[in-house]
Image (tube, rainbow, N blue to C red):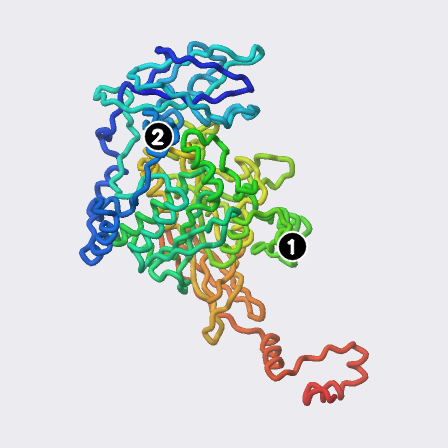
């Protein structure tokens, strides 16, 4: 076995390390085979294999891409002539042999706590199991973001490795975190077999993609499935890179009446790259499965307009990608090029709504939904990232119903509100009026993830989210004003959640197949939730759709509005609801709508009539005659003149 250490310096105490040979028990070898007693997810993989056959009618598309790939295998329809991360690392380190070996699993928790030992420790909470790279337990350290690479001059085969500090600050303790790179050796008797590893059967492009490669993957998907995909961009980053999205639907480019709009975004924090790769894998998977006749995927595509935006912050990603998976640190590339945390760069609409509620202005003067953006925020001098402005314009243009933004560094799903209502409190349960449905939406993702709700899994850092089914109200975790989730809920119709899809923000390329298996089912199940609740069309008596009609559900103090054609979607849990429709110039109309337990929104249409006053105004405006508003004295003095003017018009 060959090793390389990535120590992190802590507490401003520099360490000099020498590597000896007996203390940290590691794998003698690795088994890359699934354990006996295949679980549910393994059976699902085997059952999917019949989908991998592409019908003859679509075979020519695959063959065309294979020919373009210089006769590469069928799997390489999505693989272009790109260098692997190992090749890039080898060039960067001058051809060192050790750079080709992936991490052994300290950071990803594949090396169990029982395999880590220390001769002494202050207490269990600071034991050797806390020595994993990027475990956040020393917030006061100034050196916590700088990994240091120490490479052996040549390969070594060993069963143990010992870290022996030689010097440190006299007034401090010895604190260090490491990751170890190594090439596995076969060992059929290995006690620490990788019992959670499940090999994927999906033929996808499992690699990290730079900007050009990401664009190429999207192009290949579009060429392979031109009838159900469309590539477009929503704007540009600070450095001028286009923010590309791909649409997947049976009629790309158009909003279809009654068809809900769904979105996934990733990479708002540029160094959290797992979400970016998951969305690239998802678009490949959906294209392949659609062509292969997977009825579940075909139904999802035909009944939903899906938008995938894999890289919100490509400038930040470039910084993390340049140094690579193991040397990126916890925050390098997190922010936009001009220093904004894009996910928390949206206007704080929570304060506006809550202040209006305290002053009893809701709903008389301030509505409980579609809270307007403050003028200062929209000014050119506003401290707003270009990427955030592009996101807001995109969110306002398309009537999204449900969305998820993929992040990294944890295994948990968070839902609004993300800001605490009490001033000065950093952690406080702050539910929305739709708390029940938000809890269900979060659980739908977490419960179908392979690890999130697994009671046997080890916590990523310090908080054990598994005790809460790996879902949490955002404000109960840590308060944050101006989050994308809160803005989406308060300014648009879209219910937005954050999925923290893995402990490792930037997993090694070899970990991507397993991370895909961890998240694939969750990604699909969450998309399907857009069809839970009620939907319908609001029309006038002449059959025309009514735009911006307000849809109210009794008992839930949060309304939504109809889209341009009068259609609407309201995500709700099963139950019976009294729904009321209001619109300017129309008489309010109510009816009972029932939501079942099965996926598939209940149809609940409305026909609303114009009020008498609105009809009179319409007739007057049609003939250019407007009602005259006169003071009371003038009305008393000139009743006959007022009648004549209304009857024949005012004489000039």
Tell which tag, 2 or 1, sits nearer the viewer.
2
* Rendering quarter of residue 24: top left
Q: Is residue 91 left or right of residue 401?
A: left
Residue 216, position in %: x, y?
Answer: 35, 49
**Crowd rating for badge 2 (residues with CA inside 10 Å; few <14, some 14–19, many 20+):** some
Q: Is residue 633 left or right of residue 415?
A: right
Q: Secondary structure at mark 1?
A: helix
Above or below: residue 639 compared with residue 67? below
Residue 214, position in %: x, y?
Answer: 38, 46
Image quadrant for the C terminus? bottom right
Res. 90 mark: 2
- Asked whether the residues under the numbered discs 2 and 1 touch, taking CB atoms below 8 Å apart as contact, a structural biologist would say no
Residue 272, position in %: x, y?
Answer: 45, 38
Residue sitting nearer the eye, 432 or 416? 416
Question: Does residue 431 appear in the picture of this structure?
Answer: no
* Rendering quarter of residue 98: top left
> What residue did someone put label 1 on?
375
């Amino acid at each position: 076995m060959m090793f390389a250490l990535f120590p992190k310096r802590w507490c401003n105490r520099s360490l000099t390390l020498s590597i000896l040979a007996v203390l940290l028990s590691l794998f003698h070898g690795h088994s890359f085979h699934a354990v006996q007693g295949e679980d549910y997810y393994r059976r699902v993989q085997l059952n999917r294999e019949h989908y991998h056959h592409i019908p003859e009618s679509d075979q020519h598309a695959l063959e065309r891409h294979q020919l373009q790939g210089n006769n590469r295998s069928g799997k390489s329809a999505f693989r272009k002539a790109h260098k692997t991360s190992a090749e890039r690392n080898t060039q960067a380190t001058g051809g060192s042999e050790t750079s080709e070996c992936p991490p052994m699993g300290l950071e990803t928790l594949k090396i169990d706590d029982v395999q880590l030992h220390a001769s002494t420790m202050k207490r269990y909470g600071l034991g050797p199991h806390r020595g994993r790279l990027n475990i956040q337990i020393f917030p006061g350290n100034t050196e916590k973001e700088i990994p240091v690479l120490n490479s052996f001059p040549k390969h070594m085969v060993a069963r143990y490795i010992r870290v022996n500090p030689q010097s440190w600050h006299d007034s401090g303790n010895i604190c260090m975190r490491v990751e170890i790179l190594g090439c596995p050796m076969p060992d059929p008797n290995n006690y620490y077999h990788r019992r959670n590893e499940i090999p994927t059967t999906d033929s996808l492009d499992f690699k990290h993609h730079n900007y050009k490669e990401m664009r190429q993957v999207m192009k290949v998907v579009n060429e392979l499935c031109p009838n159900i995909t469309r590539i477009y961009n929503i704007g540009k980053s600070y450095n001028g890179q286009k923010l590309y999205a791909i649409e997947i639907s049976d009629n790309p480019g158009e909003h279809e009446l009654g068809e809900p709009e769904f979105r996934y975004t990733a990479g708002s924090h540029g160094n959290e790259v797992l979400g970016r790769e998951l969305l690239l894998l998802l678009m490949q998977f959906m294209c392949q499965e659609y062509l292969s006749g997977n009825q579940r995927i075909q139904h999802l595509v035909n009944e939903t307009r899906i938008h995938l935006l894999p890289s919100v912050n490509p400038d930040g990603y470039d910084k993390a990608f340049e140094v690579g998976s193991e040397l990126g640190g916890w925050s390098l590339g997190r922010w936009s090029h001009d220093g904004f945390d894009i996910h928390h760069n949206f206007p704080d609409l929570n304060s506006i709504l809550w202040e209006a509620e305290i002053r009893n202005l809701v709903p008389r003067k301030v509505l409980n939904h579609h809270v307007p953006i403050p003028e200062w925020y929209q000014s050119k001098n506003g401290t707003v990232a270009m990427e955030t402005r592009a996101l807001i314009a995109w969110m306002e243009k398309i009537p999204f119903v449900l969305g998820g933004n993929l992040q990294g560094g944890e295994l948990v799903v968070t839902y609004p509100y993300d800001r605490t209502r009490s001033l000065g409190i950093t952690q406080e349960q702050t539910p929305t009026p739709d708390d029940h449905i938000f809890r269900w939406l979060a659980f739908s993702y977490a419960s179908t993830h392979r690890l999130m709700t697994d009671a046997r899994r080890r916590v990523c850092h310090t908080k054990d989210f598994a005790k809460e089914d790996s879902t949490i109200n955002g404000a109960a975790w840590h308060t944050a004003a101006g989050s994308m989730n809160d803005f989406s809920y308060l300014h648009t119709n879209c219910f937005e959640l954050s999925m923290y899809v893995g402990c490792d923000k930037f997993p090694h390329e070899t970990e991507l197949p397993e991370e895909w298996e961890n998240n694939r089912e969750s990604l699909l199940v969450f998309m399907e939730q857009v069809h839970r609740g009620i939907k319908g069309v609001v029309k006038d008596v002449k059959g025309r759709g009514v735009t911006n009609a307000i849809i109210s559900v009794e008992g839930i103090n949060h309304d939504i509005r109809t889209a341009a054609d009068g259609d609407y979607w309201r995500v709700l849990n099963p139950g019976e609801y009294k729904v009321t429709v209001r619109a300017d110039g129309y008489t309010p109309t109510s009816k009972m709508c029932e939501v079942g337990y099965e996926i598939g929104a209940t149809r609940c249409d409305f026909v609303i009539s114009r009020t008498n006053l609105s009809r009179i105004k319409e007739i007057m405006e049609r003939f250019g005659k407007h009602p005259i508003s006169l003071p009371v004295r003038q009305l008393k003095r000139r009743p006959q003149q007022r009648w004549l003017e209304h009857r024949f018009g005012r004489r000039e």
